[in-house]
Amino acid sequence: MAEEESFLNAKALVVDNGTGISKNGFAGEDQPRSVFPTLIGYPKYESIMTDVEHYTREYYIGEEAMQLKGVLKLMFPVEHGI
């Protein structure tokens, strides 16, 4: 019985993967718990970026990609809501 009540009182997770911004939170709350850019960044100049220890990944996502936009090729994975 307690298990059933716990299940019935659980909040639904709400995920909005928008074209430019993703928002996540729980149903019934006034605002999202997290909001971040929906984007992926790939190094424009791999030969240069591999020399710098900080830039060793194949891709960057969200806020981190936005901060490095000058040296990344940005891609928005959601287009026209799809």
Image: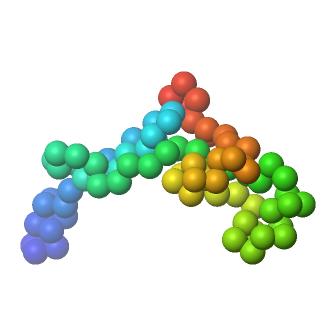
Occupied quadrant, residue 9: bottom left
Q: Is residue 38 left or right of residue 72?
A: left
Residue at position x 35%, y 54% in the image: 34
Residue at position x 73%, y 51% in the image: 71
Residue 16 locus on image (x, y percent) = 39, 41
Residue at position x 52%, y 44% in the image: 38
In the rendered view, how is the structure colored? Answer: rainbow
Up-down relation of residue 47 to residue 62 (above or below): below
Q: For the C terminus, which image quadrant?
A: top right
The residue lying furthest to the top in this view is 80
Up-down relation of residue 27 to residue 54 (above or below): above
Residue 2 locus on image (x, y percent) = 10, 74
Q: Is residue 15 left or right of residue 72?
A: left
Q: How many marks?
A: 0
Tell which of 58 and 82 is nearer to you.
Answer: 58
Up-down relation of residue 18 to residue 69 (above or below): above
Residue 4 locus on image (x, y percent) = 15, 67
Q: Is residue 29 left or right of residue 38?
A: left
Q: Is residue 71 visible?
A: yes
Q: For the N terminus, which image quadrant?
A: bottom left
Residue at position x 45%, y 40% in the image: 21
Residue 55 locus on image (x, y percent) = 73, 66
Q: Is residue 15 visible?
A: no
Tell which of 65 and 77 is nearer to you.
Answer: 65
Tell which of 34 and 7 is nearer to you.
Answer: 34
Tell which of 17 and 40 is nearer to you.
Answer: 40
